Image (cartoon, rainbow, N blue to C red):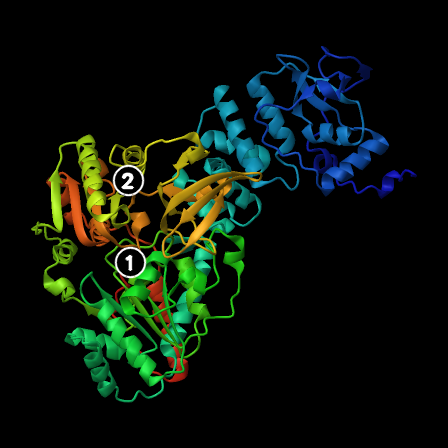
Amino acid sequence: MGSRSADKIKFRSFDDLFGEQEPKGVEKETKGTKGTVEDQVVRIVLAELHPFKGHPFRVMEDEEMMEMVESVRQFGVLVPVIVRPDKGEGYEIIAGHRRKRASELAGCSDIPAIVRDLTDDESVIAMVDSNIQRLNILPSEKARAYRMKMEAMEHQGVKGGQHTAAILGEASGESARTVHRYIRLTYLVPELLELVDQKRIPVVAGESLSFLKEVEQELDAMILSGSVVSMRDNIYHPAVFAQEDETASRIARLLAEERPPMKDISAVIETVRTELGLRTSEKQESAVRTAFLYNLSIITGSPGTGKTTVLKIILEVYRRLWPDNKIVLMAPTGRASRRMAESTGFEGACTLHSGLGLVSEEDESSRNRKKDGLDADMVIVDEFSMVDMWLAGKFFPALKKGAKIILVGDPDQLPSVGAGNVFRELIQCGLVPVTVLDEIFRQAKDSLIAHNARFIHDGNTRLYYGNDFQFLLCDSQEDAAAAIIERYCQEIESNGIEHVQILSPFRTEGAASSDHLNAAIREIVNPFQSTEDEVRIGPKTFRVGDRIMQTKNTDKVSNGDLGFIRYIDDTPDGKRIGLEFGENRSLEYSTEDLVNLDLAYATTIHKAMGSEYDIVLMPILKAHYIMLYRNLLYTGITRARKKVVLAGEKSVLFMAIHKNEISRRNTLLGERIRLYYKAYAKSAGIIVPEFPEEKLKAAG
């Protein structure tokens, strides 16, 4: 390859190309190692050169560097680097880091250098002065260089503050104010400083940001880089932000859809009510009529207020009015969907995940899957308070145009585990018709569980106690654990293990946590028999006869489903574990599949959402106080159908009832629904309701 003539090389100036003035006093060049003559040029092996500690200037292999490499190949290094003897071995580069790298890329073995015996402060000043006026210097480089030089000058006795900044600025042609502004950039977190270098943040704005706390800077950096989205002081993951926006738009369109005129259905309702032998309150009848009048409606109420009765009537009336139309019943969990089918007598209820063709949010195919939609004319979803933003974002786009949607749930239970507070936001947006059932009907109003649930909901500590709502006084966590274990054994002997469940606020901490209770109870009700009847995976050990819970959705079993291990067999392909989840649902797992199982003699209240049990035992202890909010307590006791047994301290129970500072969910779904609805309604000529001027209260 022929060499290019010098006049074809794109030189600017020595300052632009090499980053420093030609050093004074260069008279001759000799070969050697450690030079001792002031400003004598020597050739030093590249391997002996080390970068200056804290060097603020980047050595980037960009177009300018490639020009320099080509120049070195043709003409050598024209301006010697400046170095000082290193305290260890070799030399420390003061000026010429880019020339050293260009020489390496050009295949050189040594480089011309001037060796000077400089102090640390003298070295810093020389290094900064040789680079500060270079073209294309980054703000971060200038900021660090100014700060290093100012500190070095102050070490040398130069008056600090504005005086030093003025001297610095005079040397580089900038004002003292500008110097201070650049120095402030060194107080930015690296992510923000990088954005200043990329010119996505002006230097002046960077200075202002430098006064924020580090955590505030990190958040701003995430917002500016697109890692999170900020809207009205609410911080979103970008995917959740998009889900909320799309879901709000879908719901608003659903609410703005033109509804066909509704004929009088009073006679049909009365016929169905009579044939089913059901009596309804005024609010229950209102819930039925609302479901037929609107395309989207909500029915809410605490346990025992007659939600199931309303659903039975709605289903039967709809089947008689439109016998050829398709109805789908859904719920977030398998247990809730099966309970829904049992209570309404409607076969074929399914989980939202299975109905929408999903597995879980973590599953890549579920996140990106586009389903054709729900081919249903009426969709009823129970336990909708468990639905998070991701699942709502899959549900609403799948709905058939013109379908009637009825959402059922209790907003006073724990909110969804995932992001968002969809059910509460739908209720609070002021556009979705909501019927609140508040009269207790269950068990001829004799259920203490239902009455106490209402008291807890209202913040009333005057609870009723009796056969179906009991409190075992215990002074410590160990005492409570012992009392729960003893009572558990009594209850399963009388009622069967499948009807009794321990629910704990904590999973791992203390004797009354679900993990500790599981280990203790298993040794009593299912002790070790033989190694052939056990299998280990990681820290978990399972035995034949263990009560277990599935912890992840699959195409055959749902997260939260309870069952038993029936056998463990050794096969040529490894161990095979037989599981029975009830209702003739038998599965066989490999050892690897057991990672999605937990022991389930006890579980957490969060994990029990969407489930019901005949008998629930719960520890109520000061050690769990951080988790004991009113909605957690309310959710726990409303999992029980026939009996609740609490064990612990009454004072903690009262504190939990009064502790209603529900963790805020920073979501704007309700407000977005209103904004989209106004736009769609206006274009459709629909009268938009007047909303209060104050901001929509954020969901609790």
Q: Which residue is mark 2?
A: 506
> Regarding mark 1 in the picture, which secondary structure is present there?
loop
Give the residue at x 22% y 37%: 485
What is the quadrant of the N terminus in the image?
Answer: top right
Left/right placement of residue 604 relative to residue 191 reads left
Residue 164 visible in the shown view: yes
Which residue, given by chain and number where applicable, does mark 1 sit on? 699
Label 1 crowd (10 A; few <14 / some 14-19 / many >=20): many
Residue at 26% from the left image edge and 88% from the top image edge: 264
Q: How many marks?
A: 2
The residue at the point 46 percent across, 74 percent down is 375
Find residue 13 and report its image quarter: top right
Count neighbours of disc 2 (C-alpha within 10 A) and say few if under 14, some if 14 to 19, many if 20 or more: many
Residue pictured at 63% horizontal, 36% vertical: 133
Which comes sooner in the sequence, label 2 or label 1? Answer: 2
Which amino acid type corresponds to the residue marked 2 in the rendered image?
Answer: Phe
- Give the quadrant of residue 594: top left
The amino acid at mark 1 is Ala
Front position in the image: 171 or 567: 567
Is residue 244 visible in this depiction of the protein?
no
